[in-house]
Amino acid sequence: MNILVIGSGGRENALCWAIAKSPECGTLYCAPGNGGIAQVAECVPLSALDFDAIVRFVREKDIGFVVVGPEDPLVRPSSPPGAFPSSSRRTGSPPARASSSR
């Protein structure tokens, strides 16, 4: 399964390293990622807040699972988990109410 991790910090770095070890992981992408993440994932130049571009990328690359790392996209009304309501894409993120940035 192709997987997209959204974010570029230490949390996303740890997530990518752990996900990359899974035998279920096909191609691992991270948007936008960083130098450390690039060691285990293909970094793509997408903003964590550009939901339209993320949705296009997910469809283009046949992403089966999206992991949202940073809090900021989660508190937006059109956040990635809400961007896929009618698709077969799965997302993993804490609910917005769990965000420390609220």
Image (cartoon, rainbow, N blue to C red):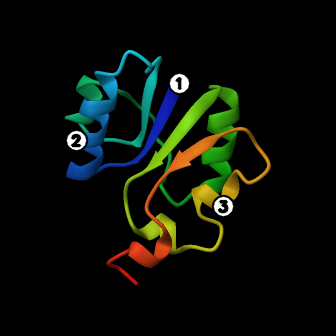
Question: Pointer 2: residues within 10 angstroms few (<14), some, or many (20+)?
Answer: few
Give the labeled residue for mark 1. Answer: 2
| Cα–Cα span, label 3 and label 2 | 24 Å
Q: Residue 33, percent across and down?
A: 34, 41
Q: Is residue 32 left or right of residue 77?
A: left
Residue sitting farthest toward the right: 86
Q: Residue at x 50, y 74 (%)?
A: 75
On-image quarter of the C terminus = bottom left
In this rendering, the answer to whether 37 lies above or below 23 is below
Give the labeled residue for mark 2. Answer: 14
Tell me which label, 2 or 1, sits earlier in the chain.
Answer: 1
Question: Pointer 1: residues within 10 angstroms few (<14), some, or many (20+)?
Answer: some
Q: Secondary structure at mark 2?
A: helix
Q: Residue 78, percent across and down?
A: 65, 67
| Cα–Cα span, label 2 and label 1 | 18 Å
Q: Amino acid at mark 1?
A: Asn
| Cα–Cα span, label 3 and label 1 | 20 Å
Q: Residue at x 35, y 27 (%)?
A: 41
Q: Amino acid at mark 3?
A: Gly
Residues 101 and 92: in front is: 92
Q: Residue at x 33, y 30 (%)?
A: 19
Q: Residue 3, percent across and down?
A: 49, 31
In this rendering, the answer to whether 70 lies above or below 1 is below
Give the labeled residue for mark 3. Answer: 82
Tell me which label, 3 or 1, sits earlier in the chain.
Answer: 1
Q: Residue at x 43, y 62 (%)?
A: 94
Tell me which label, 3 or 2, sits earlier in the chain.
Answer: 2
Q: Secondary structure at mark 1?
A: strand
Q: Secondary structure at mark 3?
A: helix
Q: Amino acid at mark 2?
A: Ala
What is the quadrant of residue 56 in the picture? top right
Q: Residue 73, percent across and down?
A: 49, 65
